[in-house]
């Protein structure tokens, strides 16, 4: 079946550095990919999405890159702040089917 | 305030005792969904609903039921809970044309 996974379970960075969180997926037929952020004790929060026909999408301090050739997705966070500390999930979806989440990467930002 | 609410937030119960976790959203969203989150397994979708009276199985529907009689409510029913359903449950909603899904605060369920 489909699977979505993240390369590293944890990532530690210094405040002000850029962070890159990676995700590999297996379902070539997915229509879009989404990144979520989950802070401790809270539900996941939508960050940004990207359609499968796009390579790059930028938001506020975040950029998502999609490489369909190698089935790889990344989330780049510019000037990482302590408030960015959380677990980050990628997810993939085909229209009308279940949303499949990866297992998450824990980002720790130290001052 | 636009939000998704879940009740109860915490529940400890025993095997076989039927329970319902309620979910309500005030954003007039068509799409609602239930997930469970377990260590090492991430978030897995249980059921989802594209609109009133329309529900579909997600990745792990066994042992769960849902209903969507009203647009705002999407209760999760465990007819006969078992210990393997001990988990953190999240309800979520979104508009049909959007990928931005809003999650509730979670319900931590323990089945003894």
Image (spheres, coloured by chain):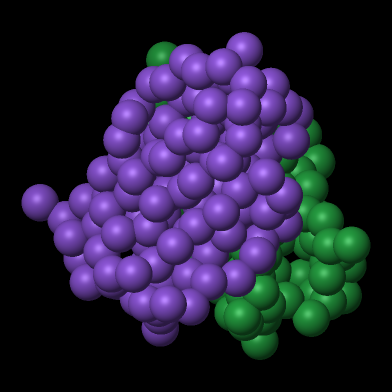
Chain letter, purple: B
Image quadrant where residue A8 sits? top right
Against A60, residue B17 (above or below) is above
Write the residue at 69% across / 22% down.
B83
Residue at 79 percent across and 81 percent down: it is A29
Colour used to depict chain A in the structure image:
green
Q: Nearer the viewer, residue B93 or A108?
A: B93
* One can see residue A109 in this view: no
Position of residue B79 measured from the top left corner of the image (x, y, whole percent)? 57, 41
The image position of residue A23, as x and y in percent, is 74, 51
Image point (68%, 53%), residue name: B61
Q: Tell me the quadrant of the picture where the C terminus of chain B can be found.
A: top right
Q: Is B29 left or right of A41, judged from the image as shown?
A: left
Q: Depth check: B26 or B79 in front?
A: B79
> x, y (%) of residue A15?
44, 25
Total number of numbered labels? 0
Residue B60 shows in the view: yes
In this rendering, would A67 be left or right of A91? Answer: right
């Amino acid at each position: 079946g489909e699977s979505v996974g993240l390369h590293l379970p944890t990532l530690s960075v210094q405040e002000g550095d850029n962070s890159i969180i990676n995700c590999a997926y297996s379902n070539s037929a997915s229509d879009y990919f989404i990144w979520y952020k989950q802070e401790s004790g809270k539900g996941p929060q939508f960050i940004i999405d990207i359609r499968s026909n796009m390579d790059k999408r930028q938001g506020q301090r975040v950029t998502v890159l999609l490489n369909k050739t190698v089935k790889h997705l990344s989330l780049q966070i510019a000037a990482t702040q302590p408030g960015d500390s959380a677990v980050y999930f990628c997810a993939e979806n085909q229209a009308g089917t279940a949303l499949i989440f990866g297992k998450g990467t824990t980002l720790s930002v130290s001052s | 305030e636009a939000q998704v609410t879940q009740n109860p937030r915490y529940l400890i119960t025993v095997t076989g005792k039927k329970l319902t976790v309620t979910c309500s959203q005030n954003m007039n969203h068509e799409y609602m969904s239930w997930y469970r989150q377990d260590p090492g397994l991430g978030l897995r979708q249980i059921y989802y609903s594209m609109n009133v009276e329309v529900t579909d199985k997600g990745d792990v529907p066994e042992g769960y039921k849902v209903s969507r009689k009203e647009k705002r409510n999407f209760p999760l029913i465990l007819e006969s809970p078992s210990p393997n359903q001990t988990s953190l449950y999240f309800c979520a909603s979104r508009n049909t044309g959007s990928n931005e899904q809003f999650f509730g605060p979670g319900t931590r369920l323990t089945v003894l």
